[in-house]
Image (spheres, helix red, strand yellow):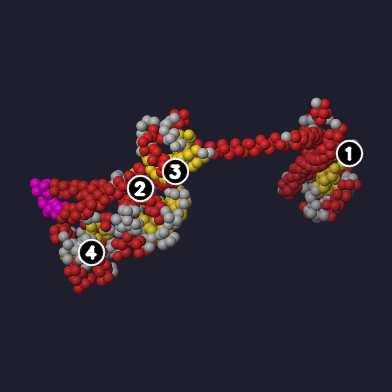
């Protein structure tokens, strides 16, 4: 007991150990004090010097004002006779007198405020006023400034009457020729100046020389007192802090040595607990549900997500058996399942989980069988795949609707061909009857019914495209981001996501659901292209301005501003021989049962209906890039649409010759009658070969060619190519009952000027034909 007490008692050796600490603290404090005193003193001197310099520069300004402003004015008054030429008064002419007087007023004001006076003197070797006579030091300074023109000031610490002052001097103005009027020969000076100052003081100065200096002497004793106080306080505080610091440091070292073994044990235990806590935290916060099961189907552990998803608290869930929340594993089937688990060890399958409220949802389960301390444990990781199943159902439904749509589109094509002569002849009949007659009204009813049938076809096509054609202003970036988030959740970790989305992009006219469908279809294709080797899936969105040179031969768009969506992957790529066909319905490069061939055709249809277009670049082995362009929405702020509609009611006519080709005889007859009623000379053919022969015999006999797209033996595309090969300058109009069969890039590359959709009215054909001919 006594030995313990003695150990804790201070000894002489412990004080000896403190000696180095005290010495180090003293030396550090001394060095810091010297440095601090030097810095503080230098700062005080700099501030005092700046204050004096400012005051002298103020005096200098007064000198300059007197000499460069007042003197010329006074001399001018003398020259004009307002003041006698020999008149002189120091109160008006002497800058040194005026400044000295002004400085005295300045000192009087300082005394009223309790401030010390600042000694000011203009010193010269040959002054007029004896008070300005330079002493020995001032004479040396005048000579020094004259010998060294680059020297602009002199500073020193001087002691006067036992007190320290900051002495600051600057050279006075250099004597100039104009100064000699008062400082040259005595006999040339004003008579009042001669009478006031007897002797040669202030006369006989030499031009270019500095005849005087200005100096100020400012007391700095109080500033140094502040320096002493601040330095002393900081030194004392620092010394105290250093003593405490070193003493505390030494004390800590002693404590650390005495408790080293205990700390090591605590650290080791803390690390073990931290690892255990981290593992527990990670498992509890997994986005998937985790279940640890025993052989009898009971639960020994569940994580937070399992409780949350099933709607139980942890205590309730741990009391259940597997068959209580998984209807696919009844109690009687559990033993066979456990045998399978022990055999396979690890495998994945799909099942159903049932919540506390009785709601079933699909799950994907990854089983891991382990044996620990003689116990068999089944570690199950469960993922909710409700969203994925819904998406798969949506894709299947979309594909079914598209298949129905393709059938509807084909029917619409045939129906449009049937409707064309009905609509055309109804218009011709109405125009040929007297207005207001019974038959004219009945013809108008036929025309209105045909127009309603035309609108019905549009609605059928709208249904076939699985979208509402009532587009509205949307910002593409938001449905795009939502779709990307969904894709990110479904893509494997071997595929890296890259996004660059400009959220300031303006509105387009479209549908958010369709944008979502575009991204999902494109993303699904990219996933398929990279599923074996992984890669990078990149999506960007930005606003771009396209010129005509950017569009020619690439995009069926007019120049303007567009939102561009770029979707790329580093998958297996597409062979160049297939690029032209990838947007065709049912065309697929995937293996059997891996795709329908409808994804890209759906995307192109959506983009076209939103007024946009798509370009593709792909290299085998490197990947593919799709550029989707959607036009920014234009807001018409005037009534130009109504004005155009009014002008459109006036049917334009012409006298040009037109070659018309269509395998449908009623349509051919109807179009011939309509065009001739507009004044055109029309030659019609139902067989493309006959039309081609007539054109070949006399290529310059026609000003315009109108052809149907779908004809036997020779299509409208092939027929147009043949016509262009004979006369490259002839304009061609293509007619079709199904717009999706037409690729704008193909038509433009051939030379076809316009593609019109059947059925077409007389008004529409009149304006289109006239516009194309006028462009020619």
* Main SS, magenta residues: helix
Q: Earlier in the sequence, mark 1 or mark 2?
A: 1
Magenta residues, start to end: 422-443
* Residue 245 showing in the rendered view: no
Which of label 3 and label 1 is nearer to you?
3
Residue occupying the far left of the picture: 438
Task: State the SS at label 1.
Answer: strand
* Mark-to-mark CA distance, 3 and 4: 67 Å
- Residue 342's disc is 3
Q: For label 4, count other residues whose C-alpha is less than 10 Å away and answer few (under 14), some (14-19) or many (20+).
A: some
Q: Residue at x 89, y 47 (%)?
A: 137
* Mark-to-mark CA distance, 2 and 3: 43 Å
Residue nearest the viewer, comparing 112 with 577: 577
- Which image quadrant: the C terminus? bottom left
Q: Which residue is mark 1?
A: 160
Which of label 3 and label 4 is nearer to you?
3
Residue 693 lies, in percent from the top left, at: 19, 71
Q: Earlier in the sequence, mark 4 or mark 1?
A: 1
- Residue 715's disc is 4
Which of label 4 and label 2 is nearer to you?
2
**Labels 4 and 2 touching (C-beta < 8 A):** no
Q: For label 2, count other residues whose C-alpha is less than 10 Å away and answer few (under 14), some (14-19) or many (20+).
A: many
């Amino acid at each position: 007991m006594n030995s313990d007490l003695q150990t804790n008692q201070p000894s002489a050796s412990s004080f000896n150990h403190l000696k180095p600490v005290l010495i180090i603290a003293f030396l550090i404090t001394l060095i810091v004090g010297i440095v601090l005193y030097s810095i503080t003193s230098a700062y005080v001197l700099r501030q005092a010097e700046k204050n004096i310099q400012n005051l002298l520069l103020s005096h200098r300004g007064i000198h300059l004002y007197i000499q460069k402003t007042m003197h010329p004015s006074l001399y001018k008054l003398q020259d004009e006779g307002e003041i006698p030429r020999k008149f002189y008064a120091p109160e008006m002419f002497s800058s040194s007198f005026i400044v000295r007087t002004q400085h005295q007023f300045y000192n009087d004001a300082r005394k009223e405020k309790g401030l010390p006076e600042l000694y000011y003197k203009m010193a010269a070797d040959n002054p007029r006023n004896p008070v300005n006579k330079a002493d020995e030091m001032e004479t040396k300074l005048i000579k020094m400034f004259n010998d060294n023109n680059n020297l602009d000031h002199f500073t020193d610490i001087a002691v006067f009457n036992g007190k320290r002052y900051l002495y600051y001097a600057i050279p006075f103005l250099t004597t100039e020729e104009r100064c000699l009027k008062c400082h040259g020969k005595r006999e040339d000076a004003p008579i009042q100046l001669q009478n006031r100052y007897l002797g040669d003081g202030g006369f006989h100065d030499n031009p270019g020389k500095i005849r005087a200096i200005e100096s100020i002497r400012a007391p700095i004793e109080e500033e140094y007192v502040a320096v002493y106080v601040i330095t002393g306080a900081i030194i004392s505080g620092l010394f105290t802090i250093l003593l405490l610091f070193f003493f505390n440091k030494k004390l800590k070292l002693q404590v650390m040595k005495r408790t080293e073994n205990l700390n090591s044990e605590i650290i080791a235990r803390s690390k073990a607990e931290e690892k255990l806590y981290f593992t527990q935290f990670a498992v509890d916060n997994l986005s998937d549900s985790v279940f640890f099961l025993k052989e009898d189907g009971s639960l020994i552990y569940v994580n937070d997500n399992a409780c949350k998803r099933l709607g139980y608290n942890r205590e309730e869930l741990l009391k259940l058996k597997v068959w209580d929340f998984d209807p696919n594993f009844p109690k009687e089937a559990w033993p066979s399942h456990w045998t399978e688990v022990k055999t396979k060890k690890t495998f994945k399958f799909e099942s159903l989980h049932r919540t506390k409220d009785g709601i079933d949802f699909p799950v994907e389960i990854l089983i891991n069988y382990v044996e620990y301390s003689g116990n068999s444990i089944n570690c199950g990781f469960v993922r909710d795949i409700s969203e994925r199943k819904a998406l798969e159902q949506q894709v299947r439904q979309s594909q079914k609707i598209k298949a129905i749509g393709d059938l509807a589109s084909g029917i619409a094509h045939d129906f449009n061909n049937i409707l064309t002569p009905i609509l055309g002849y109804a218009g011709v009949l109405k125009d040929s009857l007297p207005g207001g007659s019974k038959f004219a009204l009945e013809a108008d009813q036929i025309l209105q019914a045909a127009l309603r049938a035309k609108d019905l076809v549009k609605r059928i096509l709208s249904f076939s495209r699985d979208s509402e054609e009532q587009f509205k202003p949307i910002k593409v970036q938001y449905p795009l981001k939502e779709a990307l988030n969904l894709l990110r959740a479904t893509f494997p970790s071997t595929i890296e996501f890259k996004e660059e989305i400009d959220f300031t992009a303006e509105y387009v006219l479209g549908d958010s659901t369709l944008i979502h469908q575009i991204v999902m279809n494109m993303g699904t294709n990219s996933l398929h292209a990279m599923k074996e080797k992984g890669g990078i899936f990149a999506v960007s969105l930005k606003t771009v301005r396209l010129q005509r040179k950017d569009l020619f031969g690439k995009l069926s768009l007019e120049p303007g501003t567009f939102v561009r969506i770029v979707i790329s992957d580093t998958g297996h790529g597409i062979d160049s021989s297939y690029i032209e066909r990838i947007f065709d319905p049912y065309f697929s490069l995937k293996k059997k049962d891996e795709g329908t061939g409808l994804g890209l055709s759906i995307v192109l249809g959506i983009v076209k209906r939103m007024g946009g277009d798509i370009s593709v670049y792909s290299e085998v082995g490197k990947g593919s890039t799709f550029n989707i362009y959607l036009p920014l929405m234009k807001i018409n702020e005037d009534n130009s649409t109504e004005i155009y509609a009014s002008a459109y009611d006036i049917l334009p006519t012409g006298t040009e010759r037109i070659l018309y080709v269509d395998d449908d005889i009623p349509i051919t007859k109807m179009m011939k009658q309509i065009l001739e009623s507009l004044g055109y000379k029309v030659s019609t053919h139902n067989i493309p070969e006959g039309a081609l022969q007539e054109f070949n015999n006399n290529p310059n006999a026609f000003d315009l060619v109108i052809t149907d797209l779908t004809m036997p033996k020779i299509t409208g595309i092939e027929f147009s190519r043949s016509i262009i090969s004979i006369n490259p300058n002839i304009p061609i109009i293509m007619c079709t009952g199904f717009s999706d069969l037409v690729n704008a890039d193909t038509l433009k590359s051939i030379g076809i000027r316009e593609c019109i959709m059947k059925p077409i009215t007389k008004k529409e054909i009149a304006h289109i034909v006239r516009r194309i001919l006028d462009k020619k």
